[in-house]
Amino acid sequence: MLRKLIAGNWKMNGLKADGVALARDLGIRYAEQEDPAFDMLLCPPATLISTVGEAIAGSGLLLGGQDCHAAASGAHTGDTAAEMLADLGCTHVIVGHSERRTNHGEIDLAVAEKANAAHRAGLVSIICIGETESERDAGDALTVCSRQIAGSVPAGATSDNMVIAYEPVWAIGTGRTPTNADVAEVHAHIRAELSRKVSDPDNVRILYGGSVKGSNAGELMAVPNVDGALVGGASLKADEFWTIAQASV
């Protein structure tokens, strides 16, 4: 069994005071664990990365970014290089989130380039994949995941520098979740597909994301091949996020 990773994607939420308070609260809880049975990662908006990093220093919590540019530097106004994230103390970066794919038109190739940039900078890429509601209803969920894995996972990816996050688009922020059987089917399929891309597919952590909350985390974390969670809205509430993490043990 792989060590669970509980990652919080704060998205475009939080001002300085809120971010510091949330990060400190979680940092204290994590530091009080003699031997935490899970890894916990915070991915705040870019404006809070440095501040949150200072707030969780010494706690054992991990710090990550929500996106990065494929290039290490250059004329890319408004973008952030993976090397810049690493310079701030980040260990992880989310790439290919459905909101990036939808709102910014990111295709699999762009996601692969960003993941490759993350690896170049020494970061672990959290590569997001998942089907829309229409794709699920058409019976194409597995096909979509196969296509996104084939196109989004770069050469050189390993279990040391990559995590996969399965987020059915129709479940993100909607309160809806797939059945446990559906999650098990997709995660097993992802594991099998990873054998085409990496030499150690059994060691790659596969997270589930999409309306994860304290009330359903225990069941989801018990599903085979679910190695943690990528949590959105619930990660903005310390008690709820901590409940999710505790349910992974």
Image (tube, rainbow, N blue to C red):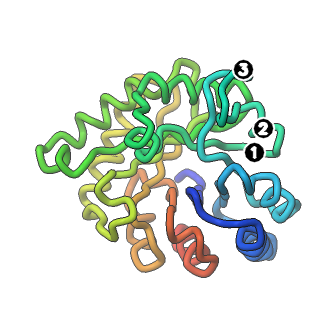
Q: Is residue 67 left or right of residue 90?
A: left
Find disc 2 in the rendering and name its residue. 86
Determine whether 139 is above or below 23 in the image.
above
Find disc 3 in the rendering and name its residue. 74
What amino acid is labelled 3 in the image? Gly
What amino acid is labelled 2 in the image? Ala
The disc placed on residue 111 is none
What is the C-alpha distance between the residues marked 2 and 1?
Answer: 5 Å
**Mark 1: which secondary structure?**
loop
**Mark 3: which secondary structure?**
loop
Q: Which quadrant: the C terminus?
A: bottom right
Task: Please state which of the two labelled residues, at mark 3 or mark 1, is closer to the viewer.
Answer: 3
Say whether disc 2 or disc 3 marks the residue closer to the N-terminus. 3
Q: Residue at x 46, y 47 (%)?
A: 165
**Residue 88, position as x, y percentages in the image:** 82, 44
**Residue 61, position as x, y percentages in the image:** 75, 60
Occupied quadrant, residue 104? top left
Determine whether 28 is above or below 78 in the image.
below
Task: Please state which of the two labelled residues, at mark 2 or mark 3, is closer to the viewer.
Answer: 3
Tags 2 and 3 touching, CB below 8 Å? no
Q: Residues within 10 Å of mark 3 (few under 14, many from 20)?
A: few
